[in-house]
Image (spheres, rainbow, N blue to C red):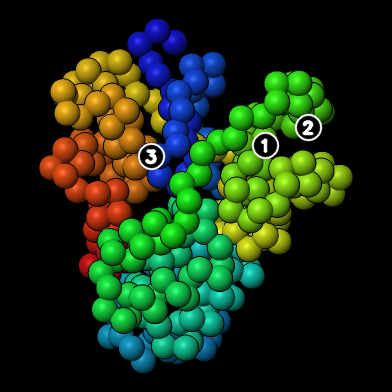
Amino acid sequence: MAGILIWQFDNLSGRGLFKNESIATEESSTRSWNEAVNTEISSDVLEQLQEESDSATYELQVNRLKNLITALDVHEKFKQEVERLIKEGHSLPDVLIAYEFLYQSYGRMQDLEPLIKQKEDGKEWDAVFTDYNRKHETYVPRSFDSEYLEGLLKTPGVTPDDIMLADRLSFVTDTEVKDILEDRLESDKSWKQIAVELNVLNGSSSLPRVQITEEELAAFSTDTFTEDNVAEAFVLAQKLAETPESVVELMQAGKSEEAIMAASYSHKYSS
């Protein structure tokens, strides 16, 4: 593994990431694959989208909705909430942008409509995202007691990702880590099922990883843009499906993560 650094991150932002060279280099899927995803859109939603669009735009809107449902493994409970918001007259691009931001932030279903309403009240998306992040404490992985952690890792069926996912869900829901892990082990539930019960939009079964070579760190870092900044840019680029070079350039120019996310999601769902 010489020359390659593996950065594992919490799927919220570049903040709180940590480096661990013992982790496998394969990228982990954000899909849980335990349950089929229902991409069928209700007739009421289809009729509303058709009324609001011409024929070309209608097909594009429907495809964007279905693509989000598939890519983010949207549970039926959350899909019904998305459809409710659309039927109540909220624009599809706003719903999709808010949903993907909250998914990446391990946000909860009850946060979705308030974000959309902020946008409708005149805020730009970067300001909406900044306000959300200001009101929600940044996730930092907790330090477990070494004996407790060793015991968890010896438990059949428990992986390091399981512990970190339980910690992540614990942080946003104020549920004890041990209670989440016990629920998973005793019920054989998927992480997607557990997240749904906690109203958390992101039910991924593993944490993504980003590979960065030492050469890339050296090439993109400067006196004012550190290696940690480079890693944050690569993490953000993977989440947004943008090139690392483009995100590094934007961050070096002083763009905030929220502004970069807002621009990327707006292009993805509104252009």
Circle 3 residues within 10 Å: few <14, some 14–19, many ≥20: many
In the image: residue 189, left or right of residue 84 = right
The quadrant of the rendering that contains the N terminus is top left
Say left or right for 180 vs 257. right
Distance CA(mark 2)–CA(mark 1): 9 Å
Q: Which of marks 1 and 3 is in front?
A: 3
* Residue at x-position 38% and y-position 39%: 14
Q: What residue type is labelled 3?
A: Gly
Place of residue 39 in the rendered image (x, y in percent of width and height, measured from the top left): 55, 67
Relative to residue 127, is residue 114 drawn left or right?
Answer: right
Seen from this angle, which residue lies furthest top? 2
Secondary structure of the residue carrying tag 3 is loop
Residue type at mark 2? Gly
Q: Quadrant of the C terminus?
A: bottom left
Q: Residue at x 76, y 21 (%)?
A: 147
The residue pinned by badge 3 equals 14
**Which residue carries the number 2 mark?**
157
Badge nearest the viewer, 3 or 2: 3
Q: Can you give x and y, in whole percent of width and height, for residue 197 in the image?
A: 71, 61
Give the mark nearer the N terminus: 1 vs 3: 3
Distance between mark 3 and mark 2 Cα atoms = 29 Å
